[in-house]
Image: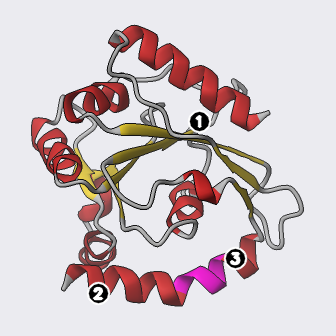
Amino acid sequence: MNNIAYKILKFLLTPLYKFYYNPKIIGKENIPKEGSIIIVGNHKHLMDQCNIIISTKRVIYYMAKKEYFDNPLTRIFFTSVHAIPVDRSKKDDNATAKALEVLHSGKALGLFPEGTRNKTKEKLLPFKYGAVSMAKKTNSLLVPFGIKGDYKFRSKNLIVKIGKPFNINNLSIEEANKILYNEISKLMD
């Protein structure tokens, strides 16, 4: 039932999103059609996840701050689009368990390894280790993406580049996180 709500909302909102923001999305074919994947990219705007959601027929489960679930109306929306609430004030084992469950069942998870929107002048904030840790625990591929440009009406420069998926099983968490950071940074150039 929940996938029906997701698909209906996607069907209704995708044309509006594309018309309003006019994103240019490059590399959609790099998103695997099946198997457990973690789609990870930079986080600059509230709408970042929409670029990936409209790029694939797969249902993408995103992790979102728990405050989005406090209001009954936004809770309905975020629940319908399979968002997993995360309490960012602590290590949220419940959210991690739900995300691992998504991956163990061969689905797609979306994450922003910066952990929050980057409102600084820095290209990227330091990455947290959740994405690479979950990828190793579940043998999931990482699919990097980079977003640059402005979110404004009929944007002329909003570009999303989706990179090739890669496996990190033979790497340490630190090495994997560094590679992920570099891949996303390159896609933003």
Q: Quadrant of residue 46?
A: bottom right
Q: 134 above or below 69? A: above
Which residue is more in the foreground, 173 or 46?
173
Residue 4, disc: 2
- Say if the magenta span includes residue 53: no
Tell which circle, 3 or 2, labels the residue nearer the N-terminal end.
2
Where disc 2 sits, the SS reads: helix
Residue at the spot of label 1: 118
Residue 18, disc: 3
Which residue is more in the foreground, 172 or 90?
172
Residue 41 drawn at (x, y percent): 55, 40
Q: Quadrant of residue 121?
A: top right
Magenta-drawn segment? 13-17
Task: State how the image is colored.
Answer: secondary structure
Kindly identify the amino acid type of the residue bearing the numbered disc 3: Lys
Residue 33, disc: none
Where disc 3 sits, the SS reads: helix
Q: Measure the alpha-carbon separation of dots 3 and 2.
A: 21 Å
Kindly identify the amino acid type of the residue bearing the numbered disc 1: Asn
Give the number of the mark in front: 2 or 1. 2
Kindly identify the amino acid type of the residue bearing the numbered disc 2: Ile
Tell which circle, 2 or 1, labels the residue nearer the N-terminal end.
2
Identify which residue is drawn at 28% across, 66% down: 82
Q: Is residue 56 left or right of residue 64?
A: right
The answer to whether the residue labelled 2 contacts the one labelled 1, judged by CB atoms less than 8 Å apart, is no
- Say if the magenta span includes residue 15: yes
Q: Measure the alpha-carbon separation of dots 3 and 1.
A: 23 Å
Give the number of the mark in front: 3 or 2. 2
